């Protein structure tokens, strides 16, 4: 579903939102990047927070990539490249990680990576890690998040 003006979301089978958005460059740079995230609906949120994700360039080539849209023909090529990258890299990643075991692995990897530098998981990430096996009875939390995120009701019909 189109979500707001620059984002697309869908709910997977384990009550996690798969989120993609276009982020314009600052100061009129005529560039944009693509962000992606997984957002658990069964963990309490105060706002839309990205629990697992990054920029599309990181999943493609481990670099932060910004595409150009200064001219129509360049913008058209950029969008073709992005569409291809989403189909080739991002959608398979969403499919691969759409289960509790893979999410746990990703969160534990994130935790190890952050601890190397004295950091820790965000509150949302830790809550997600803690809730993976205990999400039964989370209907009220899911309903609250649907309202907080202002998600379209037709996503849940």
Image (cartoon, rainbow, N blue to C red):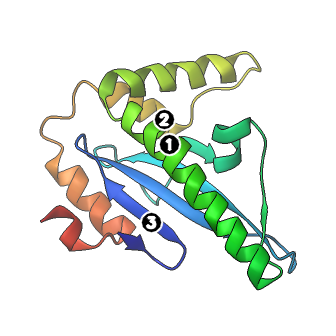
Q: Residues within 10 Å of mark 2 (few under 14, many from 20)?
A: many
Q: Secondary structure at mark 2?
A: helix
Q: Residues within 10 Å of mark 3 (few under 14, many from 20)?
A: some
Tags 3 and 2 in contact by the CB under 8 Å rule?
Answer: no
Tags 1 and 2 in contact by the CB under 8 Å rule?
Answer: yes
- Residue at the (43%, 57%) spot, across then down: 46
Q: Secondary structure at mark 3?
A: strand
CA gap, disc 1 and disc 2: 5 Å
**Horizontal and vertical percent position of residue 52:** 52, 40
Left or right of 126 on screen, residue 133: left
- Residue at the (87%, 77%) spot, across then down: 27
Mark 1 or mark 2: which comes first in sequence?
Answer: 1
The N terminus sits in image quarter: bottom left
Q: Residues within 10 Å of mark 1 (few under 14, many from 20)?
A: some
Q: Is residue 86 above or below residue 83?
A: above
Front tag of 3 and 1 = 3
CA gap, disc 3 and disc 2: 21 Å
Residue 97 appearing in the image? no
Which residue is disc 2 drawn over? 125
The C terminus sits in image quarter: bottom left
Q: Secondary structure at mark 1?
A: loop
Which residue is disc 3 drawn over? 8
Residue furthest out toward the bottom: 72
Which residue is disc 1 drawn over? 51
CA gap, disc 3 and disc 1: 16 Å
Left or right of 135 on screen, residue 119: right
Q: Which mark is residue 110?
A: none
- Residue at the (62%, 59%) spot, across then down: 82
Front tag of 3 and 2 = 3
**Horizontal and vertical percent position of residue 110:** 59, 25
**Horizontal and vertical percent position of residue 151:** 32, 69
């Amino acid at each position: 579903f189109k979500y707001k003006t620059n984002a697309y979301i869908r709910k997977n089978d384990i009550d996690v939102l798969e989120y993609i958005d276009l982020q314009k460059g600052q100061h009129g740079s005529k560039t944009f990047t693509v962000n992606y995230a997984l957002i658990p609906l069964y963990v309490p949120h105060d706002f839309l927070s990205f629990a697992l994700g990054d920029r599309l360039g990181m999943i493609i080539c481990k670099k932060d990539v910004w595409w150009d849209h200064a001219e129509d023909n360049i913008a058209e090529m950029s969008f073709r490249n992005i569409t291809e990258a989403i189909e080739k890299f991002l959608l398979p990643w969403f499919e691969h990680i759409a289960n509790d075991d893979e999410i746990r692995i990703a969160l534990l990897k994130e935790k190890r990576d952050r601890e190397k530098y004295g950091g820790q998981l965000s509150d949302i990430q830790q809550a997600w890690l803690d809730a993976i096996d205990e999400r039964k009875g989370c209907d009220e939390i899911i309903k609250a998040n649907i309202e907080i995120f202002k998600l379209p009701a037709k996503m849940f019909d």
